[in-house]
Image: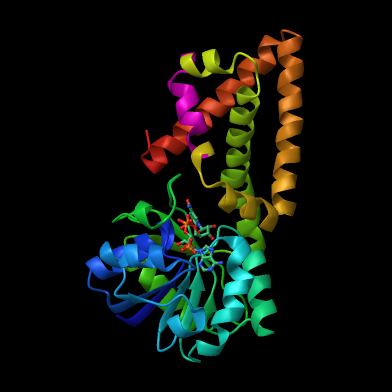
């Protein structure tokens, strides 16, 4: 049971976590923090938080669990600002989509990685953002990756693990650099492709006609291009090395596919599609997404 939970960044992820913990009676009190008191007031009206403070140091005072759910580019500033109010015994965790950059921000703010800091990343979300986007059950059945480091106290990791499990998530642990490589390939790269495709089509002269005739496949493939540009800017910059590696690799494979199409090389094209279909079908079966 969490006594006083402080959510810094009451948006899609922070707000959804607070909603679940409150709804399930797993915390006594929720304090919200962000830059805008208007957003925080709305979070209170929606029953997501009990009280709020725009000053991070004040907001975290007395909290036994602090969840940092701001965009990656804001982490360092917010960590520094909350430092003076943070209780030594409080468990501090985050939800950032890249982990090495968050560890760097923590080291920058505190000089060391505090033993009660547990880096975490819920692999769940939508293309919507802000407090109005927060929903119940967002993490149910989804994975949450914890990337504790040598300095991390096992008891702190255990508390964060228990928090995510209590909202229905499946928790696993990974090395931070490995996390960033895996997520660059499976999440950050697809977002880059969706954004770039929509942008490219949008700059074509026949744009209006093209979007009018776009079918379901286009809709499915490009849904994530509706995600928040600031958040994805921050993710690209924070995880740039791993993302550029993944993009380079993709560019190489795309080059092979372009050559095969130009040459009318049916064997290569069919083999590529068959391999990809088999993998996608297996993934869909195993993850129940159909
Ligand atoms: P979001 O809905 O935009 O929420 C971000 C929150 O942070 C807002 O409440 C915003 O409120 C606050 N904020 C922004 N800058 C701030 C600052 N400088 N100081 C204090 N508060 C600030 O974003 P989100 O989708 O929940 O993403 C939050 C984190 O979760 C990011 O690190 C992201 O990488 C990670 N994540 C996102 C997803 C996803 O699918 N969206 C999935 C997993 C992890 P104000 O405007 O009032 O300041």
Look at the picture and state if 257 lies above or below 176: above
**Residue lying at 63% horizontally and 42% vertically, measured from the top left:** 189
The one nearer the camera, 227 or 177, is 227
Outermost residue, bottom side? 88
- Answer left or right for 259 relative to 43: right
**Residue lying at 54% horizontally and 79% vertically, measured from the top left:** 117
**Residue lying at 48% horizontally and 13% vertically, measured from the top left:** 213
The one nearer the camera, 58 or 289, is 58
Outermost residue, top side? 264
| Colour scheme employed for the rendering of this structure | rainbow
The one nearer the camera, 65 or 248, is 65
Q: Can you give x and y, in whole percent of width and height, for residue 7 in the image?
A: 42, 72
Q: Quadrant of residue 48?
A: bottom left
Q: Is residue 155 visible?
A: no
Q: Quadrant of the N terminus?
A: bottom left
Q: Is residue 264 magenta?
A: no
Look at the picture and state if 171 lies above or below 235: below
The magenta segment: 213-224
Q: Can you give x and y, in whole percent of width and height, for residue 13 in the image?
A: 42, 59
The one nearer the camera, 288 or 91, is 91
**Residue lying at 58% horizontally and 18% vertically, measured from the top left:** 207
Outermost residue, front side? 38
Q: Quadrant of the C terminus?
A: top left
Q: Can you give x and y, in whole percent of width and height, for residue 182 in the image?
A: 61, 51
């Amino acid at each position: 049971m969490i006594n006083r939970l402080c959510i810094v960044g009451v948006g899609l992820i922070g707000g959804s976590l607070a909603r679940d913990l409150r709804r399930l009676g797993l915390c006594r009190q929720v304090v919200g923090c962000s830059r805008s008191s208007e957003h925080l007031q709305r979070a209170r009206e929606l029953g997501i938080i009990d009280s709020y403070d725009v000053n991070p140091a004040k907001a975290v005072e007395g909290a036994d669990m602090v969840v940092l759910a701001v965009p990656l580019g804001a982490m360092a500033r917010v960590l520094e600002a909350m430092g003076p109010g943070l209780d030594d015994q409080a468990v501090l965790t985050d939800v950032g989509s890249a982990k090495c950059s968050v560890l760097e921000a923590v080291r920058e703010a505190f000089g060391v990685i505090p033993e009660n800091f547990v880096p975490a990343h819920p692999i769940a979300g939508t293309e919507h953002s802000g407090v109005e986007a927060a929903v119940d059950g967002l993490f149910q059945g989804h994975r949450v990756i914890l990337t504790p480091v040598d300095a991390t106290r096992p008891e702190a990791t255990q508390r964060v693990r228990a928090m995510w499990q209590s909202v229905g998530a499946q928790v696993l642990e990974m090395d931070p650099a490995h996390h960033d490589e895996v997520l660059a390939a499976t999440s950050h790269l697809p977002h880059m492709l969706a954004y770039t495709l929509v942008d490219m089509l949008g700059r074509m002269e026949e744009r209006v006609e093209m979007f009018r005739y776009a079918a379901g496949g286009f809709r499915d493939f490009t849904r994530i291009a509706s995600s928040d540009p600031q958040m994805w800017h921050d993710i690209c910059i924070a995880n740039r090395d791993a993302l550029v590696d993944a993009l380079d690799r993709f560019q190489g494979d795309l080059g092979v596919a372009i050559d095969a199409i130009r040459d009318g090389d049916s064997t290569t094209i069919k083999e590529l599609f068959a391999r990809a279909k088999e993998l996608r079908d297996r993934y869909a079966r195993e993850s129940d997404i159909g």
